[in-house]
Image (cartoon, rainbow, N blue to C red):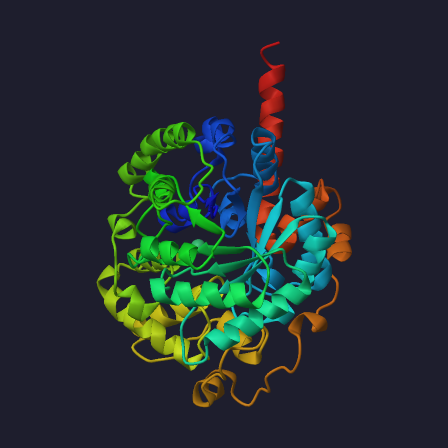
Amino acid sequence: MQQVQFVETVLRDANQSLIATRMPYEKFEPILETMDRAGYYAVECWGGATFDVCLRYLNEDPWERLRKIRAKMPNTKLQMLLRGQNILGYKHYPDDVVRRFVQHSVKNGIDIIRIFDALNDTDNLKVAVEETVKCGAVASGAISYTTSPVHTLENYVKLVKELAAMGVSTICIKDMAGIMGPKEAYDLVSAIKDAVDLPVDVHTHCTTGLAFMTYLKAVEAGADIIDTATPPFSGGTSQPSTDTLAYALRQLGYEVNLDDAVLKQVADYFKPVRDGFVADGTLMAKSLATDAQCLTYQVPGGMLSNLLSQLKSMNALDRLDEALAETPRVRKDLGYPPLVTPTSQMVGVQAVTNVLQGERYKKVSSEVRAYCRGEYGRTPAPIDPAVRRQILGDEKPLEGRYADTLEPLFEKTKAQLGDTARSDEDVLSYIAFPQLAEKFFADRQAREENMVRYTIEPM
Ligand code: CO
């Protein structure tokens, strides 16, 4: 009997896609010990935007969050999402930082590191994969899935073979936009299974409504693992429901080793949590809707909720359709990057800017400029020469691997921070998000001083 395993995403991707990662640790702490008994292949709980949002909005130490989850879930593999050479930030870091980040992620409790690059440039994956394997964790090599004239089955298979040669233990098809149809999933999983002898994990979103069909055909083609979310945090821009897929796959004769009673407790717990985010406006109705237009626009869940909040803050929600229509045009100009962090932000912000400025590429972010210089790696297709000239002028784009041009940063930063950083983890937080970390360190200090006063006074 073919077995299908599940990655539960409520703590990371579902949280990120539906409510821009705004769930604080206290909101899910009471259910972690229960989740530990569900029988998931893994719980995705860290990486992606969790690190940034913990520091930026939640006043939480992301490393402490990870250690607390680890302590409450001793029997479940914890998974994180790592943006290859970008680690958890939005730019490229030198190799010593990537290695340290991987080492400390594993040391603080991560078992599986899913590593992807927004451009599928293997030069941006190799150091993270190598270090993950060295640390004894599972390296999952992810394909950022997209469709374009250059994203052919042959090219994907070539990429998967490169990942296998690098030493990854599993392959993940990461369909962040939910645009992979059932036939594409069947063909791609079949081709990967023919090419390499590794478990295949399929990751998609419900955005376009394809997800259940896509998973079903992926499983028929031999997919071993699927990513799902507990029902209250499933659907819309998030993953399909764990409980529903467990039910359907069992009915079709697949072996699913999840504990239904535990799944129900998890779902019952998250219902009022979800309702709270609906009540305070964090979870918008649009994020829960099915939008088949995404099949044209290819806007991933997280990006759609970011676009919405960006337009909302500029009082321009009525320009959403224009911004969505501009997105694939910008993407084509930039050589068909898959839309995933950080390219999704670059393309999304550029599309909104183009629309609101009323003139294309009149204003360009420093990230898009760096992208055009080649600092994010090789683009799937060449950047439109006219657009590149408009953005770069006479400046020559870079040859070779950008990270090779970067000086080691960790020891230097550690020395520079001195006592402000209490651990190597603090140093890494600072390297990833300097201003946010600085503020967090100061707040932490103030909080502790207050606590000391408070505990001393009553005595
Ligand atoms: Co995702």
Q: Which picture quadrant has residue 121?
A: bottom right
Report the residue at 63% width, 64% height from top: 164
Camera-side residue: 430 or 130? Answer: 130
Quadrant where the C terminus is found in the figure: top right
Q: Residue at x 40, y 49 (%)?
A: 20
Q: Among all residues in the image, which is located at the extreme front?
A: 1
Q: Is residue 210 visible?
A: yes
Position of 191 with respect to 278 (left or right) is: right
Q: Position of residue 256 (x, y in %)?
A: 44, 40
Which sits in the foreground, 223 or 433? 223
Give the farthest residue toward the left.
Answer: 318
Could you say where residue 86 lies in the image, as x and y percent from the top left?
A: 59, 61
Q: Is residue 376 visible?
A: no
Is 3 placed above or below 453 here?
Answer: below
84 vs 345, nearest the viewer: 84
Measured from the top left, where is residue 29 in percent x and y? 49, 30
Position of residue 425 measured from the top left corner of the image (x, y, whole percent):
68, 45
- 155 to the left or right of 123: left
In this view, 125 is above or below 31: below
Circle count: 0
Q: Residue 210 sits in which quadrant?
A: bottom left
Residue 147 placement, left or right of 372: left
User: Which quadrant of the picture is home to ligand 1?
Assistant: bottom left
